[in-house]
Image (cartoon, grey):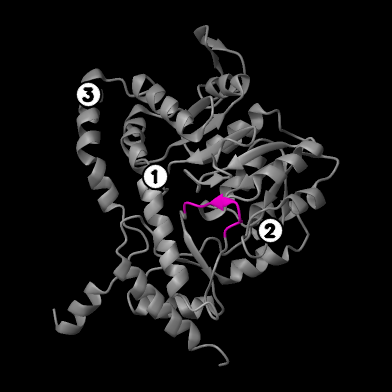
Amino acid sequence: MDQTTVETVRSQVPFLDLSVTTDEVRHEVVTRWGELLDSNGFIGGDAVTCFESEWAAYCGTSHAVGVANGTDALHLTLRALGIGPGDEVLVPANTFVATAEAVVLAGASPRFVDVDPETLLITPEIIEEGATANTRAVVVVHLYGQMPNMDDILATAGRLELAVVEDAAQAHGATWGGRRAGSFGDAGCFSFYPGKNLGAFGDAGAVVTADQILAETLRSMRDHGRSRSGHHDHTCLGSNSRLDALQAVVLSAKLPRLDSWNRARRALVGSYRELLDQDVVTMVQQCPGGTGVHHLAVAQVAERERVREELAAVGVATGIHYPTPCHFAAPFRHFSQDRLPAVELAAQQVLSLPMYPHMPIEKVEQVATAINRIASSGVGG
């Protein structure tokens, strides 16, 4: 390996590195997995109920229901709320496809709406404008780990008689006015995909709610519609969407570290904001009143594909969240013919920068230096 190759290897900046967070919990997880292996209790049991209790307390809700993944969390919640055929659900179009997917799986129709161009989040005004006589609910997506104005959204949704479902898949620990994501709406839906702020070692999810009846309905629906009275008593149309004990152990081990990991993310984004040339690279803004957890560090930049290719050439990995708005995706085009200017412009410009809680500040400086130079080189050209 020559010196040039050595320097290139040293300068690599991964988009995501889970190795340190994994190492922090490795011993605890392996020990508790050993106990599970001895007990052969892999589905449900104390590990799951323990994590559900811990997660509900963390989010500030009365109940948490573990499920198999974040998509199921959304889908089952909508069905449990009685959303189905003939109903519309407002969905911001700049979200992961699972948000819209869950609405369709519930039998309802997504009504795609635009977002604020600076925060890329839904607003009360957009909800007001987008709602129709058939609209029964709104999915509020806490995109990239930031929360919108939940007080005003709840007031608007209440006046319009809309159920509010929080898609908090990227917002573990985010707050609005001191209250955590998931504690505002009828329910909050989380994904624990490995790369999330609180990530399992595989797929996992949960729903949090203050509504006991909703929680009991979800517990039944995740387990083939079984009632609490008997294993063979199926009282509703359910699914197989149980959180397994192996993943619950991982989540319980990681949860005490989540706040410190989120503080590290906020510090890294603060450094990005200080170091990036705002004339050519603009970070997505937070809504005043919220404290984000920066699942992703997202900027907007012109000539994104050129910038991304040149960053890759100097060893900086990036992502795009999301290049195709949901209303342009093939399975959902027939649900909307409206143009959504803020969503469509963002889809052309958003660029996700490297972000993970143990990312060295030197890597942030390296990314900022590279992107400032590369983005500036195209200005006026």
| SS under mark 3 | helix
Residue in the foreground of this view, choosing between 83 and 188: 188
Question: Pointer 2: what residue?
Answer: 115
Question: Pointer 1: what residue?
Answer: 259
Q: Inspect the magenta stretch and tell me whether residue 211 lies in it.
A: no
Q: Position of residue 77 (x, y in %)?
A: 61, 32
Q: Residues within 10 Å of mark 3 (few under 14, many from 20)?
A: few
Dot 3 or dot 1, earlier in sequence: 3
What residue occupies the far top of the structure in this picture? 229
Q: Residue at x 64, y 36 (%)?
A: 185
Stretch in magenta: 286-293
| SS under mark 1 | helix
Q: Is residue 205 above or below residue 113?
A: above
Residue 240 shows in this picture = no
126 with respect to 370 (left or right): right
Question: Pointer 3: what residue?
Answer: 35
